Amino acid sequence: MLGHREATLCGAAAGAGLLVGLWLGRKLLSRQQLRTYKSHGGANGDPLLNYLLQTSLREHPLLKKLRMRTMAQPEGIMMVACEEAQLMANLARLIHAKKVLEIGVYTGYNTMNMALAVPADGRVVACDINVDFVNIGKPFWREAEVDQKIDLRIKPAVETLDELLQAGEAETFDFAFIDADKVNYGLYYEKCLQLIRKGGVIAIDNVLWGGKVLRPGDDRDTLSIVKLNEKIHTDSRVNMSMLSIADGLTLVFKL
């Protein structure tokens, strides 16, 4: 049986071990978060990321202008990363997308990005509830001469998705991008699956959520993302890839 001195030493050692474990856990989470960053989100001082952008980014001049204008906003971090947007535009071109659905517009950087990617007779249905942010991007859409391709719907996205389904547009969209309120991610995913054709793509942003998915706690946004991540992983209706680009991007391919 341990004496008082030995018990005290063991208790101190256990306490120290717990503190070290907590510290290591925080360090691990911190390192995970470093892998889930946007190029415009405070990580642009990273030399490797800068190299990636310098040797791979082909950004339309007006997209760059809108990006710089958006970054002047206090909420600029909400904008999709330019390298992520370029990937989605290339995927849209690869599958010859003509009809695109976007849930969450913000200032419209990716809206214009996708409108540039679809052909002249293409259509981007863009859903948001904040017209003030969207109005920042509208002049850039017009200058890029893609505004006629953009069908902007300022109302809750669920209403627009239901209207599209009721109008007989199920399985007519080629590409969808989900980047809006996180608590409704699961609902958006299911409705997009109905609207996307077979062989179409659904891209879902923020699936790593700054590393919070490792320890969701009781945060509703994080729990919603975790639940959807787990659902897609075993969803037999689709193929999927989760990428660590920006804040995490899941690509879903409808079977």
Image (cartoon, rainbow, N blue to C red):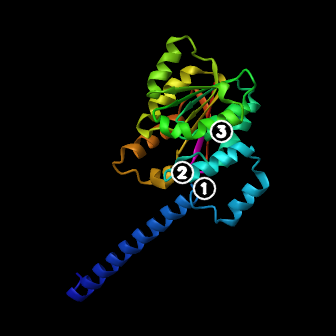
In percent of the image, x 44 and y 40: which residue is there?
182
- Which residue carries the number 1 mark? 40
Q: Which mark is residue 140?
A: 3
Q: Amino acid at mark 2?
A: Gly
Q: Are marks 2 and 1 in contact (CB under 8 Å)?
A: yes
Q: Which residues are magenta?
A: 246-251
Name which residue type carries label 1: His
Does 23 sit left or right of 57 as displayed? Answer: left
How far apart are labels 2 and 1 at the CA level?
9 Å
What separation in Å lies between label 1 and label 3 (alpha carbons)? 20 Å
Upstream in sequence: badge 3 or badge 2: 2
Q: Earlier in the sequence, mark 2 or mark 1?
A: 1
Relative image position of residue 93 (x, y in whole percent): 75, 32
Q: Nearer the viewer, mark 3 or mark 2?
A: 3
Q: Determine if residue 233 is in view.
A: no
- Looking at the rendered image, the quarter that the C terminus falls into is top right
Q: x and y percent of residue 86 in the render?
A: 70, 43
Q: Which residue is mark 2?
A: 76
Relative vertical location of residue 214 with respect to residue 198 in this rendering, above or below: below
Q: Earlier along the polypeptide chain: callout 1 or callout 3?
A: 1
Residue shown at 20% from the left, 86% from the top: 4
Residue at figure coordinates x 29%, y 85% from the top left? 9
Q: Report crowding for label 2: few under 14, some 14 to 19, many 20 or more residues within 10 A (C-alpha).
A: some
The residue closer to the viewer here, 2 or 175, is 175
Q: Residue at x 52, y 25 (%)?
A: 153
